[in-house]
Amino acid sequence: MTFGFQFDHVGITTSAAHLDQTIAWYRDHLDFLVIQQFEVGESVFTFIGTDNTKIEIISAGAAANPAPAAESLPASHDVERLHHICLRVPDLDAAIAELDRRGVALFAGPMTVEKSGQRFAFIRDNVGTIIEITDAVPMAG
């Protein structure tokens, strides 16, 4: 049996105080729109996305344990957690230029890893989530 997995979404948690600004960050910087928002108990679930990409922002309470922001890409590898999400674009250089125009600084890169054949750069959202941007076709599994 095979599962037939397809990627659906990634979830990002934020405090209730940062929910609106996190939604706005993805809207203003990456052109994501709100797809659906609903409450379950004390939590607010907001799905944002584009035509083929979806992110779930989960907001509950005051986020008493915010993760420390990584100081550099190598330092970010020292913590066990979801490290980053990756978004593929048609043209990495054009995307980097547009992100710069929108006030989004690169966290790292652009760089190329010859062994994977991928070229990419990293940014961070308003709450420190690391986002990889690449124009490479995913590696065959």
Image (cartoon, rainbow, N blue to C red):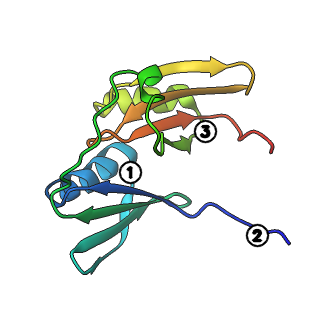
Nearer-N-terminus badge (1/3)? 1
User: Which quadrant is home to the N terminus?
Assistant: bottom right
Residue 105 found in image quarter: top left
In the image, residue 44 sits, relative to residue 120, either above or below, namely below
Instruction: Indicate which disc residue 61 carries.
Output: none
User: Which quadrant is home to the C terminus?
Assistant: top right
- Which is more toward the observer, 67 or 101? 67
Residue 60 at x, y = what percent?
23, 65
Answer few, some or many: residues within 10 Å of disc 1's Cα (few below 14, many 20 plus, some between 14 and 19).
few
> For mark 3, what is the residue?
90
Element carrying mark 3: loop
Measure the alpha-carbon separation of dots 1 and 3: 15 Å
In the image, residue 113 sits, relative to residue 84, either above or below, namely above
Element carrying mark 1: loop
Type of amino acid under label 1 = Asp
> For mark 2, what is the residue?
3
- Which is more toward the observer, 69 or 139? 69
